[in-house]
Image: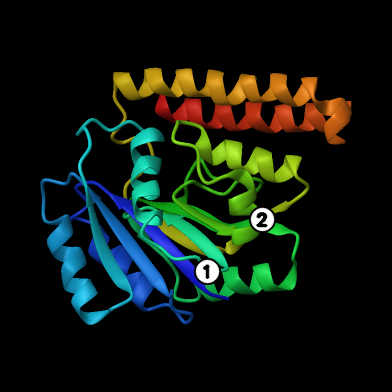
Amino acid sequence: MNYYIVIPAYNEEAFIALTLQSLVSQTLLPKKVVVVNDNSTDKTAEIVLAFAKENPFITLVNKTSEAIHLPGSKVIQAFHKGFETLDNNYDIIVKLDADLILPNNYFERISSTFEKDAEVAMVGGFAYIEKNGDWIIENLTDKDHIRGAFKAYRKTFFEQMGNLKPAMGWDTVDELLAKFYGWKVITDSSLIVKHLKPTGANYNKTARYKQGEAFYTLGYGFFITAIASSGNSGMNKSEVFITRSYFSRRMSIFSSVVF
């Protein structure tokens, strides 16, 4: 299966070379990798261009935006910028962070999972962080949830949900939509992704305000809509309850880290 990757990047000179090296070392190489340099003031662009020179499937796109780190909106707007440059000849589209080290067989396993089950909407591994010299599972990791840092989507589902939503909570909303439409979300605990910059490290007061705002608009608004339309959508009361419980669990896990 052909897969394309979009990597939003803001001042990632410390990590992006490791991420790109893990991509060019994959047993199943990506057809295209687009790195979106989102107003970086460091050497992010230079590092990407050096990799692009040796690996023609890697390209750099420059984007100008506010320097403030607003999780969700800024990142997904950068993703959209990169996605706009791609053609339609992919089977899997991947949103990847610029501070990860993936195992060499990561996308071979991801692709195999999609190929084996046509009902799978998205697949991902588990995030690990370094602590006292050891790699331990990151506390945001959940066996029922794929981290926003490494989302891989089947093209059919990606088009069905209408791309990623540029607001905090996007990486929960996509999974809710997958469940709502009857797709499967698969996590693979054998795929250990090293997360070099722990989640929440760059969040500020404005970002936290935006988090609450987005959870209100994307979260509870979604459930009101889901419950109101359950009679026509085929979603019964128990399914709505399960979906609402899933979202509430994701909120509590995330809030415990960010706040």
Residue located at (19% from left, 34% from top): 67
Please tell me which residue lies in front, 215 or 136.
Answer: 215
Please tell me which residue lies in front, 117 or 199.
Answer: 117
* Residue 112 locus on image (x, y percent): 64, 74
**Which amino acid lies under the numbered mark 2 shown in the image of this protein?**
Ala
Residue located at (40% from left, 21% from top): 210
Please name the residue that numbered disc 2 is placed on: 121
Cα gap from disc 2 to disc 1, whole angstroms: 14 Å
Q: Is residue 62 visible?
A: yes
Q: How many marks?
A: 2
Task: Answer left or right for 124 relative to 176.
Answer: left
Task: Answer left or right for 181 relative to 55.
Answer: right
Q: Which mark is residue 90?
A: 1
Q: Quadrant of residue 237?
A: top right
Assign a secondary structure to mark 1: loop
**Which amino acid lies under the numbered mark 1 shown in the image of this protein?**
Tyr
Task: Answer left or right for 198 relative to 220.
Answer: left
Q: Quadrant of the image for the C terminus?
A: top left
Please tell me which residue lies in front, 95 or 160.
Answer: 160
Q: Quadrant of residue 209?
A: top left
Assign a secondary structure to mark 2: strand
